[in-house]
Image (cartoon, helix red, strand yellow):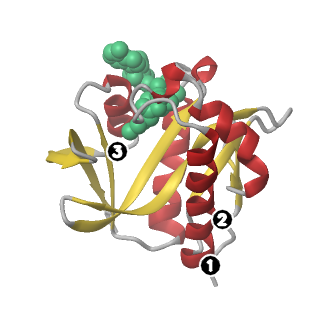
Amino acid sequence: MRKPIAQLRTSRLLLDRVSSDDLDDFVCFYADPLVTATLGGVREPTWVTSYLHRQVEHWERHGFGFWTVRDPAIRQFIGRGGLRHATIAGRTEIEVGYGLMSEFWGRGLATELALESVRVAFEVLDFRQVVSFTLPSNVASRRVMEKAGFEYDCDVVHADLPHVLFRQTRIH
Ligand SMILES: CC(C)(COP(=O)(O)OP(=O)(O)OC[C@H]1O[C@@H](n2cnc3c(N)ncnc32)[C@H](O)[C@@H]1OP(=O)(O)O)[C@@H](O)C(=O)NCCC(=O)NCCS
C-alpha cells in the first residue's frame, strides 16, 4: 500500500493536500503582481476558484497533486506546489511545480519543496521521470530545478510562450 502523502513535513515546510478551504490564501497568492509575473499575471478570484477546484479534482482522480505550503509552527501560508499531470510538447508528463509568496523567496524553500516532490514521485508514486518547465527568463526557477536534480531537456512552447523544459529520470 502507498504511504500517505496528503500531509507531509519537510524540515521547514508543512505540505497539505490542497483544499477548497485554502481559497483565501490562493486568492492572495494570485493577486500579487510580483508572484504572478512568471505565472501569467494577476488573476481574479473567479479564475482562482476554478483553478483551485481543478487542483482538488486532480487529487480526487489521481491520488496526488499540489500541496498548500505552510509554516509548520504557525501555519502561515507560504505558497503552493507539488506534482501533477501536464501535457507539454504533446506528451503527458508528471510536472513538479512550485510558487511561493515573495517574502519567503531566497531561503531555499522552493528547492526544499521541489526535492520533496521529486522524492514522492520516485519513492512513493513510482514514477520513472518528472519534468519541470518555466519561462527562459525565470532564472530563479531554473536554478531551483538544477538544485533539485533536473537537467535541461529542450525548448518548448507552452501556453503560447517559449519555455525551457527540464527533466529528471529515476536512477533505480
Ligand atoms: C521561483 C521561486 C519558486 C524560487 O523560490 P525560492 O524559494 O526563492 O528558491 P530557492 O531559494 O530555493 O532557490 C533560488 C535560487 O535562484 C537563485 N536566484 C534567484 N534569483 C536569481 C537571479 N535573478 N539571478 C540568478 N540567480 C537567482 C538564488 O540565488 C538561488 O540559488 P542559490 O541557492 O544557488 O543561491 C520563487 O521566486 C517564486 O515563487 N516565483 C514566482 C512563481 C514562479 O515563478 N514559480 C516557478 C514557475 S515555473
Q: In which quarter of the image is residue 70?
A: top right
Q: Sequence order check: which comes first, mark 2 or mark 3? A: 2
Q: What element carries label 1?
A: loop
Asked whether residue 42 is in view, the answer is yes
Identified at 73% across, 35% down, the residue is 77
Foreground pick, 104 / 115: 104
Return the residue at label 2: 5
Q: What residue type is labelled 1?
A: Arg
For image coordinates 42% across by 35% down, the residue present is 39
Proximity of marks 1 and 2: CB atoms separated by less than 8 Å: yes
Badge 3 density bin: few <14, some 14–19, many ≥20, Cα 10 Å: some
Say what amino acid the circle numbered 3 marks.
Answer: Gly
Q: Type of residue at label 2?
A: Ile
Q: Is residue 83 above or below residue 22?
A: below
Does 62 appear above or below 79?
Answer: below
Residue at which label 3 appears: 149
The residue labelled by disc 1 is: 2
Q: In which quarter of the image is residue 170?
A: bottom left
| Image quadrant containing the C terminus | bottom left
Which quadrant is the N terminus positioned in? Answer: bottom right
Q: Which residue is drawn at 56% across and 53% down?
A: 51
Distance from the alpha carbon under mark 1 to that under mark 2:
8 Å
Q: Evaluate whether residue 11 shows in this view.
A: no
Mark pair 2, 3: CA separation: 21 Å
